[in-house]
């Protein structure tokens, strides 16, 4: 068993020291407070991760939109070039 990089013997020593320092009456209350603290830290961590994911998704969407617009502009430009090339070809073949 390994909790936060601390093995079973270390956890046992910590619990015995906590029992000696705080006493059997105060220990359950401290455990409850520790549980609440860990729960709030986990909630804050999840909220922070969700915000990071949201920002990353927004940046990805913006990048995708820019890329799509750039591709559309390139296609329009290519169509114009093709059209101009066809017109030049027709003029050259008409002159011959």
Image (cartoon, rainbow, N blue to C red):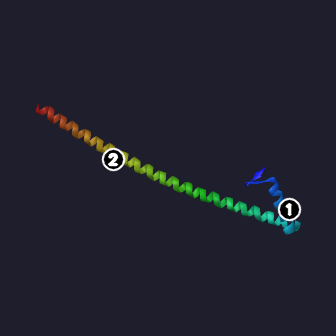
Mark 2: which secondary structure? Answer: helix
Q: Which mark is residue 37?
A: none
Q: Is residue 86 left or right of residue 37?
A: left
Camera-near label (2 vs 1) is 1
Q: Residue 57: where, in percent of width, then height?
A: 52, 52
Q: Which residue is rendered at x = 42% and y = 50% of the image? A: 65
Most distant residue in the left direction: 95
Q: Which residue is mark 1?
A: 16
Query: Against 13, is 25 above or below?
Result: below
Query: Against 91, is 24 above or below?
Result: below
Crowdedness near tag 1: few (<14), some (14–19) or many (≥20) residues, C-alpha within 10 Å: few
Q: Do the CB atoms of the residues marked 2 and 1 lie less than 8 Å apart?
A: no
Task: Judge by depth and name the residue closer to the eye, 8 or 40.
Answer: 8
Query: Against 67, is 87 above or below?
Result: above
Q: Which residue is rendered at x = 64% and y = 57% of the image? A: 46
Q: Which residue is rendered at x = 72% and y = 61% of the image? A: 38
Q: Which residue is mark 2?
A: 73
């Amino acid at each position: 068993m390994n909790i936060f990089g601390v093995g079973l013997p270390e956890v046992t020593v910590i619990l015995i020291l906590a029992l000696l320092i705080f006493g059997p009456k105060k220990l359950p209350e401290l455990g409850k407070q520790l549980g609440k603290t860990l729960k709030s830290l986990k909630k804050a961590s999840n909220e922070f991760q969700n915000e990071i994911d949201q920002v990353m998704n927004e940046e990805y969407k913006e990048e995708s939109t820019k890329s799509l617009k750039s591709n559309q502009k390139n296609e329009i430009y290519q169509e114009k070039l093709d059209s101009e090339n066809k017109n030049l070809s027709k003029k050259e073949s008409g002159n011959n």
